[in-house]
Amino acid sequence: MTHYSLSNWLEFFGRAHDGINLIAGFPKSQLWRFHPGEEILLEQRIARQERWINHIAGLEELDQNFFMPYWVPIQENMCEWYIDLSDPAFPVFSAYFFEEEPYGWYKNIISNSLADLILSIENGADFESLIKKENQGTLDIIYRELAIRNQ
């Protein structure tokens, strides 16, 4: 992995941090497992991101080639959903590992933008449907990869 500096992404990181804190203000009962935990200071989120960067630097090559230091894990203790800072819309996605030949990681888009996700939460999003969408995206990845493998 090439050297990565969070300072290159600090403006975008600050905007993602603000979005995550907006989401944290909603009740956990509304957001289920998506809830990011309590609102935190920017310095605390920077420290989390630095831990994330250090974590991925220690991963095996297959994992290191997939996970990016400019992805912001949304939940503190559960790296399940991420925000991609390299895209100005800040898409929100989960990561899925395909456990059959060909092995590999895949992005499963939950929302094309963080702003759209926040608006859907403000409008009373049905997170059961969102999780079903995530599960369907995972199944689509599996079906696609199995079809490629079996050609």
Image (tube, rainbow, N blue to C red):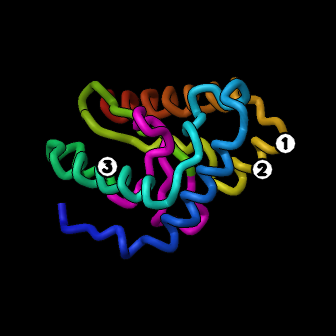
Q: What whole-number distance in Å separates the C-alpha atoms at marks 2 and 3?
A: 27 Å
Mark sitting earlier along the chain (3/1): 3
Q: Which mark is residue 84?
A: none
Q: Amino acid at mark 1?
A: Asn
Q: Amino acid at mark 2?
A: Leu
Which residue position is annotated with label 3? 52
Q: Amino acid at mark 3?
A: Trp
Q: Specify whether 145 is left or right of 19.
A: left
Q: x, y percentage for residue 76?
A: 44, 39
Q: Is residue 151 visible?
A: no
Q: x, y percentage for residue 101?
A: 24, 29
> Tag 1's secondary structure?
loop
In the image, what residue occupies the spot 57% across and 40% down?
Answer: 38
Q: Which mark is residue 119?
A: 2
71 up-or-down from 140: above or below? below
Marks 2,1: beta carbons within 8 A: yes
Q: Which mark is residue 123?
A: 1
Q: Nearer the viewer, mark 3 or mark 1?
A: 3
145 up-or-down from 119: above or below? above
In the image, what residue occupies the spot 52% across and 44% down?
Answer: 93
34 up-or-down from 42: above or below? above
Q: What whole-number distance in Å separates the C-alpha atoms at marks 2 and 1?
A: 6 Å
> Tag 2's secondary structure?
helix
Magenta part of the protein: which range?
69-91
Inspect the magenta stretch and tell me whether residue 145 lies in it.
no
User: Which of 34 and 132 lies nearest the eye of the viewer?
Assistant: 34
